[in-house]
Image (cartoon, coloured by chain):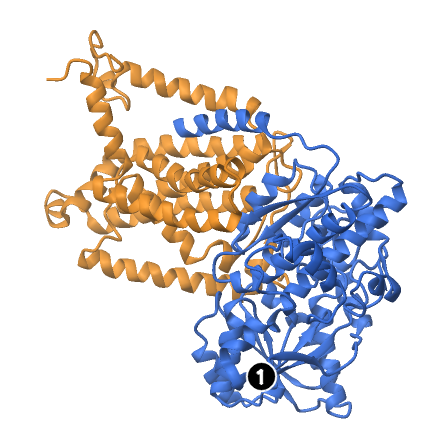
Chain colours: A orange, B blue
Amino acid sequence: MLYREAGDFKTSYPSDSQTFPIRLDRYGYYALLAVAIGVVPFIINDYWANAIVVPFLIYTIAALGLNILIGYCGQLSLRIKGFYLAVATLAAQFFLIWLFTRTGWFFNHSPTGMISAPERTVFGLAVTGPRATAVSAYLICLAFLIALAWLARNLTRGTLGRKWMAIRDMDIAAEIIGVNPLRAKLSAFAVSSFFIGIAGALFFAVYLGAAEAGEAFGIDKSFLVLFMVIIGGLGSIMGSFLGGAFLVIGPVMLKLLLVNQLGWSSDLAAHLEIMIIGALIIVFLILEPHGLTALWRTIKEKLRLWPFPY
Amino acid sequence: MKITHIAAALAVSMTAAGPVLAETLHFPMFNYRTGPFAPSGIPFADGYQDYLTLVNERDGGIGGVPIRISECETAYNTERGVECYQNIRGDNPLILQPLSTGIVYQIIPRAAEDGIPIHSMGYGRTSAVNGEVFNWTFSYPANYWDGASVLVNHLLDENDGSLDGKKIILLYHNSAYGREAIPTLTHLSERYGFDFQTIAVDSPGQEQGNQWLQIRRERPDYVFLWGWGVMNSVAVQEASNIRFNMNNLYGVWYSGSENDVMPAGAGAHGYRSLAMHGTGRDFPVYEDLQTHVYDRGLAAGAGDQLGSVLYSRGMYAAMLAVEAALTAQKIHGVAAINAAQMRDGMANLVITEERMTELGLGGIGPVFSVSCQNHGGPGQAMIQEWDANAGKWNMITDWIASDRELIMELVQEDSLAYAAENNITPTCMD
């Protein structure tokens, strides 16, 4: 009933290969987008925008980027080639932090290595710096996320994305059918880095406002984004959103529930939060190894048949 | 995306349902009772909260208005700190004391915009001493650059006025906090002709084998320790392992608590550190705390930190905050002050020996008064030495003054650069 497909005929190739083939689904997403652009900016308060929604949007961009690399192109996996690549990437993590905390030019020669974002405006509205309002920060991140999600979706179902997936599924077979592995892998790295670069810039300038490379972009951040991709679902745009929501909004909601609603002490809540989120991750990965997006897919399949399953 | 909107809808209902508390003074606490820095965060939080509880229980609040305490757990993580700040900023907070240099850096521009005063007592952005640029940030009674200078002045005393040819190594926490002292020490090394080197320890600092190997190779005359949390105790342990003369190992005031020396046992005997305030349970205020707080079961945390260095620091910070609120009430003639009035109270705060004695905290801190040009207090500190046999810190000097001329010069340079970067015209608020 919820997903009524009766009468939903496709009469052209473009309509057949669109992103959301089910009409109701499509309208649902359009409505969601309209609410996000047209309604949320008017009702959102500062706390929700700055502390929850903005980091969610930013982390989702980062998860999208990483998903392109490891979900679609299959790099950083435990295959031998990927493994060496993973070690090299890990080394880069430490090298870059070292570089950004050692070389004065990168942190504006500030005595502490702490940099702060200057004010930047879009259409006359401040989006970074202390004068930026919650709504402008929300809207700028939303604009980036919509544009990048659209780009990611279309890249991954086009030639480039199919090449990445061919490399991911079996690199020798892909090479035989004419995919250049070097180009495919390098392009995946390039596109992924582009996404994550945007996420990092937004994270520093819009969300934090001031940052110190070692602390704001340490290895735990890389792992957080990796977990988002794994929990959300490898090789899925939807998964990036779900993973981002789970690991950004989840802990804050838990904190609000335990501390603000139930009145528990904040340190107890913080310890419980680590345990609960950790347990949830394990439970999810055991019950649904393909991530939240596979769970969503199952629900959707069921809803398409409901109330008359066969 | 869907979750976002459910969350947003929930938010609206939750804020609407929030309790309306009239006529209280909101003192938010940004604690860290979890994570690798919890050993340092817990005693401070306990001391801060116990003193505020005492004021509530004994005096019925400040000027008759009860204090409302709210807690937010930051785990010494700047992102969580930002979240905490967003959570309380609409709730009339009077004073922010996050006990984290990283978080202070994040909230300085925001709090100035929102009009909420910050008291970063002996931490945070040192150049915030210049109140003309940083109207809303206070760092009295001393800052990191003072600390570095006091250490050098103390060593000058010990070495008959000359450090020529001596070698000093700074072992620092590789973060904004740890790097704060480097510019001052570099300047001082040029002035006094000592050889100055820096060695970084990445956070949290549980592994320092390499660093101490390097120290052993370099054979420095003195090592300055600029650490926090678990890094301190590891450093003290490593120093005692390589049989470094503990009298020549000096910590900043954030490296001089019981937690930092206890794990090394007898090996830590003779370790010295800066002290920005007195410590121990000899203050008469503990009698009041006993009757009004501990005996009524109102003590914060496990109640096992009483009299420790960081507990005393939390208590001292709370005392200064309460005194600033009293000053604000006097200036404005209202009991239920707001954040802007609290700022005026901090900007005109005067701490005298008589007042500290009256509060049962005689001699806990230096005598000082705050002015618009100097939000940083007198910049004095004492040196304390750990007696491992008695298990207590002994003050081995009186208050030592820092080289204020040099520090104010550096403060001007850095604060004016910040002002230019952020389009601030330096001016006093009052």
State the residue in front, B206 or A164: B206
Query: Measuring 41% from the left and 57% from the top, which residue is drawn there?
Result: A219
Query: Measuring 42% from the left and 46% from the top, which residue is drawn there?
Result: A273
Query: Is A80 left, or right, of B104 in this rendering?
Result: left
Q: Would residue B180 be visible to someone looking at this image?
A: no
Query: Is B283 left, or right, of A196 in this rendering?
Result: right
Residue A109 occupies which quadrant of the picture? bottom right
Residue B360 in the image: state x and y as whole percent: 79, 64
Residue type at mark 1?
Ala
Count of number-bearing discs: 1
Whether A1 is drawn above or below A266: the answer is: above
Residue B249 occupies which quadrant of the picture? bottom right
Mark 1 chain: B
Q: Would residue A77 be visible to someone looking at this image?
A: yes
Residue A158 in the image: state x and y as whole percent: 25, 32
Q: Which residue is mark 1?
A: B388
